Amino acid sequence: MAEDQTFEFDVLVIGAGGAGLRAAIEAASGGLSVGLVCKSMLGKAHTVMAEGGVAAALANVDDRDNWRVHFSDTMRGGQYINNWRMAELHAKEAPDRVRELEAWGAVFDRTKDGKILQRNFGGHKYPRLAHVGDRTGLEMIRTLQDHGIHQGIDVHMEVTVITLLKDGDRVCGAVAYDRERGRFRIFHAKAVVLATGGIGRAFKITSNSWEYTGDGHALAYHAGAELIDMEFIQFHPTGMVWPPSVRGILVTEGVRGEGGILVNSEGKRFMFEDIPDNYKSSTADNPDEGWRYVLGDKEARRPPELLTRDHVARCIVREIKEGRGSPHGGVFLDIAWIKEKISKSEEHIKRKLPSMYHQFKQLADIDITTEAMEVGPTTHYVMGGVRVEADSQMSTTVPGLFACGECGAGINGANRLGGNSLSDLLVLGKRAGEHAAKFAGEHGAGGIDQSQVEDAKRWALAPFERFEGPGADPEGAYQIQHSLQETMQDLVGIVRRGDEMERALGEIKKLRERAGKIGVPGNREFNPGWHTALDLDNLLTVSEAVARSALERKESRGAQFREDYPEKDPDKWGKVNNVVRKAADGSMQLKSIPIPEMPEELSKIIKEMG
Amino acid sequence: MRYRAEQCVHSRFLLLSEMSKTTFRIWRGDREGGEFRGYETEITEGMVVLDAVHQIQAESAGDLACRWNCKAGKCGSCSAEVNGMPKLMCMTRLSDLPLDEPVTVQPMKAFPIIKDLITDVSWNYRVKKKIKKFKPRPPDAEDDTWRMAQEDIDRVQEFRKCIECFLCQDVCHVLRDHDLHDEFIGPRAMVYTAALEMHPLDTEDRTEELRKAYGIGYCNITKCCTKVCPEEITITDNAIIPLKERVVDDFYDPVARFLKRLGRGKAKAETEAPAAKPD
Ligand SMILES: Cc1cc2nc3c(=O)[nH]c(=O)nc-3n(C[C@H](O)[C@H](O)[C@H](O)COP(=O)(O)OP(=O)(O)OC[C@H]3O[C@@H](n4cnc5c(N)ncnc54)[C@H](O)[C@@H]3O)c2cc1C
Ligand code: SF4
Ligand code: SF4
Ligand code: FES
């Protein structure tokens, strides 16, 4: 068997999406040695798929915008259980982070006077999303990638981390394997930044790729970190529903930002019928006003299609459940209708939403400039993640371990606003890189405990032995993953109930037992069956964390809707976050921790903005 | 009556739904060699080649290797040759292929094989690193950034749509048939260079390299790259030919080139794009 390869860095960044790249660039800027590891090739992470835009109060389109409004929008969207300090830092620093991308070569769409153009998005009071058509994520990741490759960062592509190494409390490295040959790589590092993204593969219908198996969440959890807000999974209201093979693929909110409307089979714009009280004053109550808002009329209020994602998703589910859905179990999303309002609407749509146009044309035979799309909710984003200190992004319990991007948590509370992820990964990614570098500068290297390395390797190779060993009766990784996805989709999905989630926990336990018997055919060279088997362990861990946290929170708030507790409970649940952590006996422990009181200056902003 | 049930039912989907099993010939092997193997799998409405590959993986070939991420033509991971044509597997609909004969799926030819449908594309990453990076002129708007007019960046934005699928590299005969990977950076890297060269803020000069290290002379404008680009970037006409012109101009008129360098923003002088307004 080939020897392990060993590498030493000051800072190891796990994940090369926007967050990981930004962190690595920052860490390397001070001259430290930085390693960057990713499961796919460089530039292929989820960030590349982001469409709509990056939220920053640049005030280029509406000069009433500023960080205070962005802060208060983010808190309202998160239903006030966000980490307010993170939301503050994010709102204040996002504009600089976006401008910095321009200095690194990004080419955003422009306003008439040559500034970065911004568009409307759900939950954002003013047009705030800097964008490039509907391929903003591609622009961002390519900019960071092309800048990053000249910063002396050592990139390890198609390498998957399977465990973090610890020296006492602190983290001191990681064990990984390369997908190409299945050889192990041992990374020693003074500080480790997790930027592994989300957990969408735990669900059957998702906009997320194979990569999103909650690796960072699980790595951190097993290393002793806390996971916070895990009950909050964002179901994006508009995923494709047809044909079956593309079910779940995202239809950007940008469609609604550009004037797209949601309609049921009776031809009714149903979003007008259910506008939550706290958004009534800022939402249009007739189509005409909604359209004027799209055109940029500052007096007009936003159309109800741009309410927060959790709410829109639930309205769609209601329409479908009550028999007013589209032929393939969704509702209609119509942008073609704007031809009634503007000339050359076809050109306009193709220019503003080119990849949506292509996606529907090529995958569903629908021309969105003349026909309505069919859409339904899809698992999109996890608000929950590694609990970290706001300023430094360092784990609250594991020194030297940092987390940012989708696998970090706190900023989004119970629901993330569209566009806030791309900005959060820049702002908090930079901070994570900066503070990881600082930590590395202040601490020596930890000592590697070889037995931890050997344990990880043994665990990783076990599926091969179980396939062939004496009396082998192996389980298949794909089948278990499939069952888990069905369980989570059906029992811990958009509409939740206590008894169903209890059942889900029972199922997850059984699946975990079966997963212990997974056998994998073939060898270690680029073997997707093997990769799926190893990733599955992480999926099971995060699924349990989601189900436990959701069961514990006996109220409906943001992305969590409980049929058995349909109301918000401001006095109890409005004041706490759920946190899970691995207990000494290996079981998952949950506690609710109080949200620290907001400083006067911030609570004043929220009161003023309403 | 715009939201009727029938609106999404298309005849060709109905045709497909009546079909059942389809045969795929998928290349299986590694660096040492390999062969095509046959697989049968059930086809349903709207399926793309990548779906079939995944289905085969789950049913009967757990270790069949392929790359993918987005399933929507956005990441450029799933490049392969389908019935001999360089394609994104996730955007190639089975209903567009003749299914009465086996569908052939094989890895890209211009790159070394790793396993099954996976090739070693790391050369593309090394090539990119060689290209001189973006060098903006100092900020000149009052807020310490820049102003750029939309019409001045349309062309650059076209190039920046590239998803790095490397299908154009795969199809270019200079790389595919003549294996001149050391002499020629290929169409993708030309598009990248063009995006930098025509960026209104960039001040770097890459013409010397284009002629020598990047080997622009090897391109004989066959336009095969443009034809396969899933992002519909007009690689040859909009990127390579203007770069070639630039190289020729600079080579024969070094004085003009020097003067251009002195003035801010060579992009304006060398393309038809109007000058970016300072503010
Ligand atoms: C279709 C789609 C559209 C979206 N549109 C928007 C939008 O318009 N605006 C917005 O703000 N947000 C949007 N989002 C959300 C946003 O794109 C993501 O939340 C964000 O890009 C996550 O970035 P990240 O850097 O945290 O993770 P990613 O970009 O997903 O990167 C994760 C990285 O971690 C690596 N990794 C994971 N596990 C391991 C491991 N075990 N070992 C090594 N490496 C590992 C992966 O290979 C990858 O490189 C969208 C998401 C999707 C799916
Ligand atoms: S036009 Fe040039 S770069 Fe494109 S395929 Fe032909 S020779 Fe290659
Ligand atoms: S230019 Fe087109 S074909 Fe070439 S890598 Fe980019 S997207 Fe792919
Ligand atoms: S999977 Fe992303 S382009 Fe095909």
Image (cartoon, coloured by chain):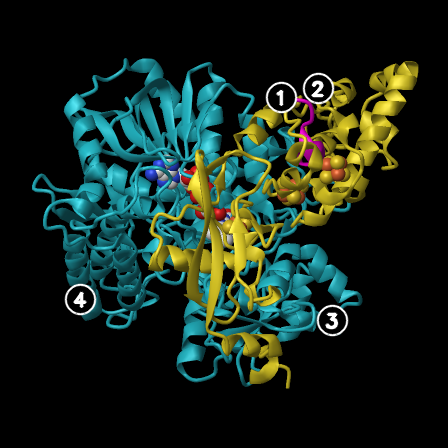
- Residue contact between numbered discs 1 and 2, judged by CB atoms under 8 Å: yes
Disc 4 target residue? A503
Disc 1 target residue? B130
Answer yes or no: is residue A601 visible.
no
Which of the two discs, 2 and 4, sits closer to the camera? 2
Q: Earlier in the sequence, mark 1 or mark 2?
A: 1
Colour of chain B, in one word, is yellow
Tell me the crowding category of disc 2: few under 14, some 14 to 19, or many 20 or more residues within 10 angstroms, Cα based.
Answer: some
| Lateral position of residue B29 relative to residue B48, left or right | left
Type of amino acid under label 4: Arg
Q: Which residues are magenta?
A: B182-191
Could you tell me how far apart the alpha carbons at marks 3 and 4 are, in whole angstroms? 49 Å
Which of the two discs, 1 and 3, sits closer to the camera? 1
Could you tell me how far apart the alpha carbons at marks 1 and 2 are, in whole angstroms? 9 Å
Could you tell me how far apart the alpha carbons at marks 1 and 4 are, in whole angstroms? 56 Å
Tell me the crowding category of disc 4: few under 14, some 14 to 19, or many 20 or more residues within 10 angstroms, Cα based.
Answer: some
The local secondary structure at tag 3 comes to helix
| The disc label shown at residue A339, or none | 3
The answer to whether tags 2 and 4 share a subunit is no
Disc 2 target residue? B213
Type of amino acid under label 3: Lys
Type of amino acid under label 2: Ala
Type of amino acid under label 1: Lys
Snapshot quadrant of residue A555? bottom left
Snapshot quadrant of residue A586? top left
State the image coordinates of residue A335 (x, y, percent, origin top left): 64, 68
The answer to whether tags 3 and 4 share a subunit is yes
